Amino acid sequence: MGRRIGIWGLVNYRKHPTAENYHVFSFNTEDEQALMEEELKANNVWFESSSEEIKGGKIYLIGIEKRDFKKAMNANYVVSAKYRNPMIKNKFLRYTLVILTASLVTLGIIGYVKNMQKLNEKTEQLEQE
């Protein structure tokens, strides 16, 4: 996915700095930009593309009109899905985390069920007195 821009760097798009009717998407590689262009052409969305040199290398930009933003976002999701990286790259750590989480949830459910049985027993005992 593209270089993160925006207020906190959570997205790879922003409003155009000088033209309010445009949004700008940024990408790290030419392949990402090419896929975005293909998706935009498939959805009949007009766009402009360019690239800029920055300190970290080169950034690829695509500008679209504000009225086509929803279509462009769908195209951006396709690009994001193809080029995303896993949050935890090490497979062992990733599966360990999944197993640990599932174990904790299971223990929590077992504890809840056992405490409900004890609560029902106490309730019945109090009702009999």
Image: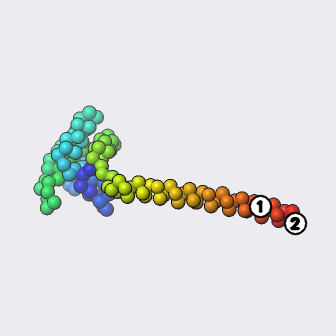
> Does the image show residue 21?
no
User: Residue at (50%, 55%) from the top-left corner?
Assistant: 102
Q: Look at label 2 and name its amino acid.
A: Glu
What residue is shown with label 1?
A: 121
Looking at the rendered structure, the secondary structure element under dot 2 is: loop
Q: Is residue 115 left or right of residue 54?
A: right
Who is closer to the viewer here, 55 or 48? 55
Q: Quadrant of the C terminus?
A: bottom right
Nearest to N terminus: mark 1 or mark 2: 1
Q: Look at label 1 and name its amino acid.
A: Glu
User: Residue at (53%, 60%) from the top-left corner?
Assistant: 104
Q: Position of residue 57 (x, y in %)?
A: 14, 57
What residue is shown with label 2?
A: 129
Q: Please identify the residue farthest to the left as the structure is shown.
A: 53
Q: Quadrant of residue 79?
A: top left
Q: How many marks?
A: 2
Who is closer to the viewer here, 9 or 129? 129
Q: Residues within 10 Å of mark 2 (few under 14, many from 20)?
A: few
> Does the image show residue 18?
yes
Q: Position of residue 112 (x, y in %)?
A: 64, 59
Looking at the rendered structure, the secondary structure element under dot 1 is: helix
